[in-house]
Amino acid sequence: MNTVCIMCPIGCALSVTEESGKIVVTGNSCLRGQKYGESEFVCPKRVVTTLIKGEKGGVVSVKTAEPVEKKLVKEVLKEAAAFRLSSSVRAGEIVLENVAGSGVALVATADYDAK
Ligand code: SF4
């Protein structure tokens, strides 16, 4: 597979193949790119950022506390869109546990006042 390393702004073009049961990454300029290529090949993951609406209006920006499997991103966004926040939160606090069954929480990235 071919992909672009997103670990820094350089954006090296990576080629990732499996040879004799070993994952081989080429095109990377550093170890971070090798690790990124390996993880993309085995189980790609992404940090998801979105907005959650408050029950009484307004929105708060949130992100997954850790990267989630790429195949769950749509479900994370769907669950976040359906959720309504009923209480105030501070940046860094958990808004929704185990979003989309990923085992990862959505956390606020800004303060939200529910009043
Ligand atoms: S391989 Fe290294 S230098 Fe290239 S984009 Fe990734 S982090 Fe940056």
Image: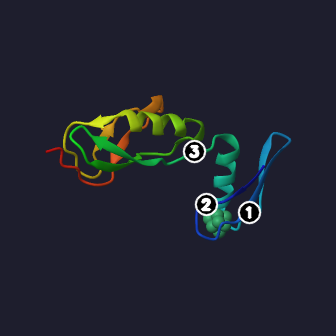
The reply to whether residue 42 is visible in this rendering is: yes
With respect to residue 30, does 111 lie above or below?
A: above
Question: Quick one: SS at disc 2?
Answer: loop
Q: Which comes sooner in the sequence, label 1 or label 3? A: 1
Q: Which residue is mark 1?
A: 13
- Mark 1 neighbour density, 10 Å: few (under 14) some (14–19) many (20 or more): some
Looking at the image, in which quadrant does ligand 1 appear?
A: bottom right
**Quadrant assignment, res 110:** bottom left
The image's mark for residue 24 is: none
Nearer the observer, 76 or 21: 76
Q: Which residue is mark 3?
A: 45
Nearer the observer, 80 or 93: 80
Total numbered labels placed on residues in the image = 3
Q: Which comes sooner in the sequence, label 2 or label 3? A: 2
Is there a contact, CB below 8 Å, between mark 2 and mark 3?
A: no
| Residue 75 image position (x, y, % from top left) | 50, 34
Q: Which residue is mark 2?
A: 6
Q: Which of the image's four quarters has the C terminus?
A: top left
The residue located at (48%, 33%) in the rendering is 102
Mark 1 to mark 3 CA distance (whole Å): 18 Å
The residue located at (66%, 47%) in the rendering is 40
**Residue at the bottom extreme?**
10
| Residue 111 image position (x, y, % from top left) | 24, 53
Question: Quick one: SS at disc 3?
Answer: strand
With respect to residue 84, does 15 lie above or below?
A: below
* Side of 60 where 34 appears, left or right: right
| Residue 77 image position (x, y, % from top left) | 47, 39
Mark 1 to mark 2 CA distance (whole Å): 10 Å
- The answer as to whether callout 1 falls within 8 Å of ligand 1 is no
* Side of 61 where 34 appears, left or right: right
* Side of 53 where 34 appears, left or right: right
